[in-house]
Image (cartoon, grey):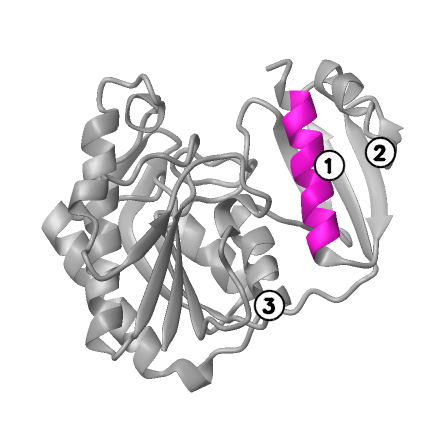
Amino acid sequence: MKIFISADIEGVAGVVHREHTARDGKEHDRARMLMTQEVNACIEGAFACGAAEIAVNDSHGTMRNLIPELIHPKAEYITGSPKMLAMMEGIHSEFDAAIFLGYHSRMGNEGVLNHTFHGGVIQNIRINQRDMGEFALNAGISGYFGVPVVLVTGCQHTANEAHEFLPGIETAIVKRTINRQSARHLSPQSAQTLIKEKTITALSNLSNFQPLLMKGPFLVEVTYLHSGLADAAAILPIAEKVNPITHRFQTDDFITAFRYIRSLIAIAGSLS
């Protein structure tokens, strides 16, 4: 059994503020430690279920957050950016399951540190009239390769968002949102125990899960926080202006759609 893990940081127990998530944040090293420990708990659960190969993709910010010396010695990990598939770099059809750790809800939803890829750029992303955050978009990539997402960890709003797209997915709620920058957390030890247990539950029932299959053609709308960001991204020829802050494009391929979304964000982000 081969397992792919995409690891973000905002949904990790104990993380609530930019001081945890930003590279120059005073609490960033503590958050990195907590993130790495939650990843290791998931890895231990996967190996307990007989996993033969585990790949972990560091999926937050610079994508250089996991502490190499502390990563489980039997797992491999992917770090650095840019990466063509960003949070899903390394996914392929040979994996039996994907797990999303430390995830957060989309911009505009409730949830600790909610945003969609770039909190300084994106207001919303819609595909075929459906709002999508990082969970849905990344699950769509996993589904493109035929790999089911079996577990997501984070706050209760992340879990609810995941259930909108994959009703049967396992969830590990390691904290409960109070507002965007405060939450009631499990202790790190309890969060890690829960993640390990939920990993074992999910992988022990692998036949119950199906990949999220996004059916094209895909009509994509990207809405920015302000018109200046849209103006910058308009240089990408595929972008059709819908209103001062929204671009629209259409494609038949989900990976192509994702790459265009990431390209628009990267161009707009050069101004933020």
Mark 1 or 2: the one toward you: 2
Numbered circle sitting on residue 145? 3
Whether residue 264 appears in magenta in the rendering, the answer is yes
Q: Mark 1: which amino acid?
A: Val
Task: Give the vertical position of 252 relative to 58 (above or below).
Answer: below
On-image quarter of the C terminus: top right
Q: Secondary structure at mark 3?
A: loop
Give the magenta-colored segment's residue range: 255-268
Q: In which quarter of the view is residue 208 placed?
A: bottom left
Category of crowding for the residue at label 3, using alpha-carbon neighbours closer than 10 angstroms: few (below 14), some (14–19), many (at least 20): some
Q: Nearest the camera: 77 or 218? A: 77
Query: First in sequence: mark 1 or mark 3?
Result: 3
Provide the secondary structure element on which disc 2 rests: loop
Q: Main secondary structure of the magenta part?
A: helix
Image spot of residue 214 (x, y percent): 69, 64
Label 1 and label 2: CA atoms lie apart by 9 Å
Instruction: Out of 104 and 44, give the one closest to the viewer.
Output: 44
Residue drawn where x is 83% and y is 60% of the image: 217
Question: Is label 3 in contact with label 2 (beta carbons under 8 Å)?
Answer: no
